[in-house]
Every structure is written in structure tokens, then in C-alpha cells.
Amino acid sequence: MGEYAALKRADYSACHSNPEDRIKMPALVLDGKSLAAQTEAELLSRVEQLKAQSSGKTPILATILVGDDPASATYVKMKGNACRRVGMDSLAVELPASTSTEDLLAKIEELNSNPDVHGILLQHPVPEQIDERACFDAIALGKDVDGVTCLGFGRMAMGEDAYGCATPQGIMRILEHYGIEIEGKHAVVVGRSPILGKPMAMMLLQKNATVTICHSRTRDLPAIVAQADILVGAVGKPEFIKADWVKEGAVVVDAGYHPGGVGDIELAPLMDKASAYTPVPGGVGPMTINTLIMQSVLSGEKSLG
């Protein structure tokens, strides 16, 4: 934990450790944007060191974009830019919207077999004729730097070595950096997607939280949210989780982003109610790509170092 984060953690602990004695203080902002920038500086140094050790070779992240969805193309471009900022290379693979499952599987196998590729990202979503899950699971475990394979999820859930799914792993890094206590806390995750809600719950469980997963069939959602010491909004609907559901002093993590700069949680009224929160934008989002890049560098270090 950095000096700044340690000082903020001390302020947080003094003000929020005992709800009855708590001094009213502004919520701690869990700034993912600044943490991502700090991490990029560290990764740049690691990549430079790796180049020096391996005759100029760098980690390479292969990105696969199927079709011409503008949002997906933008995300892939952002990931390529993030690679360049830390001095590593990216390999952009673009396939037509008519690509079949078999064609995509063949491309993934080609990248699996390429020793110069250290990470593989298949941009979600793919065209509907493609079996996305089969293609995710075809990615070699050692190159699954986005943490999307069933094998990687299972190993992570069992406490074995694997790359964590990028968004929930990024959230865990934010909580760790700012010294948010997890052990013994009641964490409520709203959403159960295979690349966010489910791995998020397992990661919190690994850190000894008591975890409740909520979803579209959950009864009396506001009452369950009100029990959360740590709340993670991962439902994919703008401001679906209302501020008046959240208890005083909760740590609020919003993993959503929607037009107008809002997330899945009604955040504005929580700035004086929560003990800590991730802003939207600038909270979870920057840490998703940053975690992907960090895990790509780690894969490169394992291969080249």
C-alpha cells in the first residue's frame, strides 16, 4: 500500500471502525484511475527490465475482434493503447462478422501455439452464430489473461493459481490498495454474470467475507442490500440499486457504466452516507484494462524472464 493510500486508510479506520463512535467524514474515494496510472508506471519499469533480460523481447497481448461493432472496436483500441503505454506489444486479430465457431477456434489454437504471444483476449460479445463459451474455453490457461475460461474460474475458486477475471480482480486490487477490510464482512454482490458477479463473489469469499449473491429472481432485494458492509453493483442497469437501500457506512463498489456517466448504483446521495465508494467514471473501469495488462506482463515474465 502506498503512503497516500496508507494515510487515507488511517483516516478511514479512525472514522469508520465503530459506527456508534464514528465522526462524520466525507466518504473515501476509491480512485481506480489514479491507481491504474501508478500501476502503469510500475509495469513500464518491469517491461523495460524484461526487454533487457530477453534480447529486446516484450510481452505480447493478442486481441481478437470478430465483426465490426463500434463499441467493441473502441474497447480493443483502448487495450492496444494501454499495451503501448507500458512498452509491450499487441497483436490485433480482426475477423469478419461471418466467422464461424470453427474458424474462431482455429485462430485461437494458432495463437495458443505461438510462443511469442503471452496473452489472448477475445472481445465480448461475438456474433450470435458463434459459441462464445466454447471459444473462451479454448484459450490456453497460461494465456487466459482476461480470466474468462471455466478452468481458470474453477482454479481461482479453489484457491489455485490462475489469472483472475479482469473486472473483479481489478476491484479486489482497489479494495486492497485502499486498505478496505474484507475478512468477516458481509459482502453483497448484485449480479451473477460469469465474468463479473460470479468470480467477484468467489474472490470475496477467498478473502473470508460472508457473501450473498443477488440476481433477477432475488426476493426483497432492498432488504438484502441493506445488510451489506461491502456492496458490489454488477447488474448492468443504470442506477438500478437505490441509495436509500444502502446502509450507513457501507463500502460501495459500482462496476457499471452507462450513458450520462452513471453506474448501476445511485451514487450521488451516497457520498455522505457510504464510508467509501468507487466513482463513476474513474473507479472500476480503468482497473479492468489495467488488470488485463498487468496479467499480460506477468504472463510474459513467466515465459521470458
Image (cartoon, grey):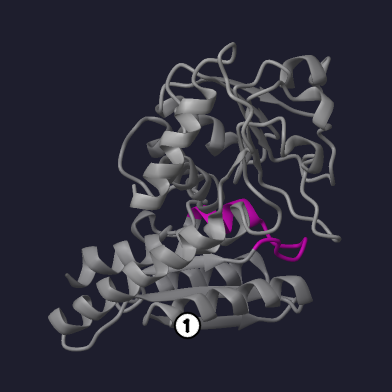
134 falls in the magenta region: yes
The percent coordinates of residue 267 (x first, y second) are 77, 42
In which quarter of the view is residue 50 placed? bottom left
The percent coordinates of residue 84 (x first, y second) are 45, 83
48 falls in the magenta region: no
Q: How many marks?
A: 1
Residue 295, placed above or below residue 189: below
In the depicted view, which residue is nearer to us: 81 or 270?
A: 270
Residue at 41%, 47% in the rendered image: 5
Residue 104, placed above or below residue 136: below
Q: Is residue 27 visible?
A: yes
Q: Is residue 2 visible?
A: no
In the depicted view, which residue is nearer to us: 167 or 226?
A: 226
What kind of element bears circle 1? strand
Residue at 44%, 80% in the rendered image: 85
Residue topped by disc 1: 91
| Label 1 Cα crowd, 10 Å radius (few <14 / some 14-19 / many 20+) | some
Q: Amino acid at mark 1?
A: Leu
Residue at 70%, 71% in the rendered image: 72
The percent coordinates of residue 242 (x first, y second) are 84, 32
244 on left or right of 208 = right
Which segment did they paint magenta?
Answer: 124-137
187 on left or right of 176 = right
Quarter in which the C terminus is drawn: bottom left
Which residue appears farthest toward the bottom when viewing the image?
56
